[in-house]
Amino acid sequence: MITSMNRRRLLKSSVGGALALGVGTQVPRGLRAAASVLENRQDSILVVVQLSGGNDGLNTVIPYTDEAYYRARPQLAIQKSDALRVDAETGLHPELSGFSELLQDGLLSIVQGVGYENPNRSHFESMDIWHSCRRKSEPRADGWLGRFLELAEPVNATRSNQVAALHLGKNEQPLALRSQRVQIPSVQSVDQFRLTGHQGDALREWVSRLTAPSASPSSAAGLASSADDLLGFVQSSTSSALAASEQVDQALQDYQTGVDYPDSALGKQLLTIAQLIDSGIQARIYYVELDGFDTHAQQAATHANLLRQWSDAVTALVRDLERHGHGDRVCVLSFSEFGRRVAENASGGTDHGAAAPVVLAGGGVAAGVIGQPPNLEDLHDGDVKYQVDYRQVYATLVREWLGGDPVPVVGQDFETLPLFAAQA
Amino acid sequence: MRHELEDIDPAWAWAPFGPSDEQPWDLRLVTHLFRRAGLAAGLAQVDQALESDPQAIVAEMVERSRLAATTDQPGDELSRTILASGDSRRLSAAWLYRFLNAPEQLLEKMTLFWHGHFATGAEKVNDARMMWDQNTLLRKHAVGYFPELVHGIARDPAMLVYLDSVSNRKSHPNENFARELMELFCLGEGHYSERDVQELARCFTGWEIRSRRFRKNRYQQDRGTKSLLGQSGPFDGEDGIEIVLRQPAMPQFICQKLVKFLVCDEPPLSPRLLAPLVSEFREQGFQLAPLLQRILGSNLFFSRHSLARKIRSPIELVGGLLRALGGTTNVVEMATGLAGIGQGLFFPPNVKGWDGGRDWINSSTLLGRANLVQRTLSSPKTRFQGAGLAESLEQQGASSPDEVVQWLLERLLATPIDQDQRAILLSELTGGTGDREQRTRNTLHLLSTFPEFQLG
C-alpha cells in the first residue's frame, strides 16, 4: 500500500535523481558479495544504438595489413593509407574520425568478431536472435533488456511507476525491450514528457500541491480500502509524472550542450537522451536505431555516409555527457544484426554476412580493441567466423555495467569480457 | 493486508442487485454501469436510466447487443472506404468511430474484450481486410456462444497469420496455435502438459490458410490416434477444440478474465467467490449473454468492491469523456493518440493482449493521457452536441461555475475529489485565462490530470 510517506520517498528520489530501483532488493544472491560495486551501478545507464540492415564490419574496422581483405574487395576495400590507424593491424574507416579521437582519449572499445553459432542471414531472424537471445525454436515472449528491467524492478513492491527505459523512434518497439511486466514507452520526441496546455496558475498550483512533501492522499470516503491502494498508486504515479515533466521542462530550458551534434535524426535523438539523462529522469536504458546498412549495391558512398552519421552522433553524445559530468555512468553500445560477406558482389555492394565488431563508448570502458582481427583465410561459408558470442557482451554489460544477474537475462552463464576499466 | 473480498458471501456477490437506502439508484451507479458496459452513458441515456431500474436496464442492454451483433452499425460505411484503401492504420479510426457512436455500447466493449483476449496485431498480419473480418467475427459472437467464437477464431486467417500457423503439416505439426488455444484462449497455464500441446497440434494438421482463406488439406491431416487431456482417439481439429472447451478449467478461466475486465482490476477473485458465476456459465451451456447479465446486474458489481476499482484504459479515458459530454472529434487523430499511450486498436502489444490495470500507468503514459485530452479539447474539430462545451453544458442546466464543476464531477468521476481540488477547478473556471469556452475546456483538461480521473 502506498502511504503518503512512500509518496514522499518516491518523489524525493525522482527529484533528487537518486534511484527508483531500491538498493538491495534486486541484487541476485550470487552477487551480494559484490554489493559495493553494484551500488555504484544503480545509476549506470546503457544507450543502445542499433545499426539496422547489417553493418559491414570489415569496412568499419579495417584489417589494413591483410592481403586477403584486399583480394576479396578490389573495389570496396579501404586503402591502408586512408584507414585511421588504431594499432599495427587494425584501422578505422576514414569517416570514423570521431571514434578515432574517442579511442585516443580512452573512451572507446571495439570488440572484434561478435556473432553466434550457426548464423542466420535473415534480417528479421538474426535481429530477433540478438534481441531475445533465443533461437527460432524457442518462445520469444521477451527481450534481453526487458528481462533485465523486470529483474531489476522490485518484485511485488509498489510497481515502479518511473520510466525504466525509453525507446526513441518512429519504428515499432524493439523486441529487446519487451517484457512481461515492465511497460516501456516508445516516444518520437521529448515533448511526450512535457505537460502541454495553458492552464497557467491553476495547473501550477495543483502540481505544486500534489508534489508538496506534506500532500496526503485525498480521503475517498466510502470506498474499500484497496480502492485507496489503486488511487494511491495513481496519485504517486501522477506526482512522479508531474515531477518528471517539470524536470524535463527545466532541463530543456537550461540545457547548454556546448557540443555540436550532427543535424541528423540520430544526432537529435542522442541530444534528447543527453538532456533526459541530465534532467535526472531515471531510465536506465535508452534505445535508438540507425537504419540503412543493407548495402547490397553501390555501397561505398552510402556506407561512408552512415558511418559518419553514427560516429559523429555517438561522439557528440559521449563528449556532451563528459562535459555534464555523466561520462562515467553512461555506456553506448552499438551493434548490428550481422556483418556482411567478405567478398564484395558484382553490384559494388556486399551481401548478408555473419560476425562483425561491436562498439562500446563512454567514460567507463576499457579503451582499445578486444580480440583478433578476423581471420579471412578461415571462413565459414564465405563469412567471418565469430570469436565472441554476442551474449557474452550482454552478460558483461549486465553483470559489470548495469549490476544485475546475467544468467536469467541471456539464458546461461558466460565468462565476462574485459570491457570496463574499473572492474572489481 | 488481506482484502475484505475474501469475506464476501459468494451467493450474495452474484445475486441480483436491488437499490436500497445505502446504495440508491443514483447518478453514481448509473454512470458506473454505463462506464463499464461501454465507454459512458450518453446525455439522454442518463436521465432515462435514472427513471428505470438496474435489472431492466442490464437485461435490455444485453438483449439489444445480442440482436445488434449481426446488423450494420455506424462506421460500417467508413470502414468499407478504408478497406478499399488497404491501410491497416486507418482501421483503428474506423473502429473508434463505431465505438464512439454505437448505440449498443456493450457490444463494442465486449468486442474490445475479445480483441484483447484473441489478440492479433495488424502490423504483423499486414492485411486490412483480414483484420476487419476478424473484428466482424469477434463482434458477431461477442455476446453469443463462446464455443462458436473459439471455433471461428481457430479458422480465422488473421489469427493464423499472426501466430505463424498458416501451414500445418503432418510431418511437422505447428504447436503455436495449439499452445495459445490452451494457454491464452481457454484454460490458462498449468491446466495442460507439453504433451497435450504436441497432441493438440497433431489434431490441427492439414489446417491452413491459402490465398487468405481457411481450408483443410486432407493430405496433410494426421489421422492417427491422439492422447489429449486424458482422452484418446483419431481426433481432428474440431474434436481437439471441443475437448479443450470441456475442460473444467475453461469456465473458471473465462469468468475470471471477464470479472477483471468488467468488475475490478484487483485483487483476482478467489475460486470460491467465482464459483456461482462459473456454475451459471456452465449451466447456460457457455452462452455469454446470460453470464454478462448476471455480472452486470450483481450485488458485487454495484458494490464498493467494484466502484472506481479499475484504472481507465486510454479509450475509456478519452472516449468516455467524449461520450459523457456528447462530444465528437477527429477520430483519426484520436486513434493515433490512443496508440501513443498504449492502446492502438488492432495493435495489441503482444499475443497476450493488454494486461490493463496498473500496466496502463507510468510517467510517460500519464503525461500522454493529459496531453491527449488537451489536444482533443483544443482541436476545433471537437464539438459538444454540435456546439461549444460551455454552451452544451448550459443546455444541460449547468450555467454557474458551481453547477458546471458539479456537473463534470458527477458525470465524469467514479470517485470523489476533495474540497481543495474542487477549489482549484473553480478558480480555473472563473479566474483562468481566455474566454468562457476556453476556461471551461481548460477546467476539463485540469480535471483530467487528477489521479481520480484515471479511475473508472
Image: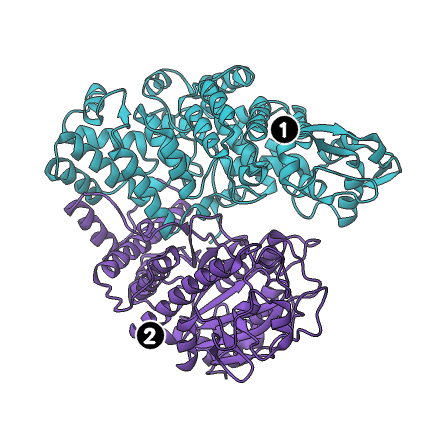
Chain colours: A purple, B cyan
Name above or below for residue A187 compared with residue A70: above
Name above or below for residue A309 compared with residue B240: below
Residue for point 43% across, 40% down: B339
Q: What residue type is labelled 2?
A: Glu
Nearest to the observer: residue B133 or residue B315 = B133
Left or right: residue A75 compared with residue B323 = right
Q: Residue B36 sits in which quadrant?
A: top left
| The C terminus of chain B: image quadrant | top left
Left or right: residue B37 compared with residue A269 = right
The residue under label 2 is A322
Residue for point 49% across, 27% down: B85
Label 1 environment density (alpha carbons within 10 Å; few <14, some 14–19, many ≥20): many
Q: Which of marks 2 and 1 is in front?
A: 2
Indicate the chain on which mark 1 is placed. B
Nearest to the observer: residue A413 or residue B235 = A413
Label 2 environment density (alpha carbons within 10 Å; few <14, some 14–19, many ≥20): some
**Residue at mark 2 shares a chain with residue at mark 1:** no
Name above or below for residue A236 compared with residue A363: above
The residue under label 1 is B281
Q: What residue type is labelled 1?
A: Phe
Q: Which residue lies furthest to the front in this view?
A: A74
Left or right: residue A235 compared with residue B68 = left
Mark carried by residue A399: none
* Residue B17 screen position, x and y as percent: 47, 26
Secondary structure of the residue carrying numbered label 2: helix
Nearest to the observer: residue A147 or residue B193 = A147
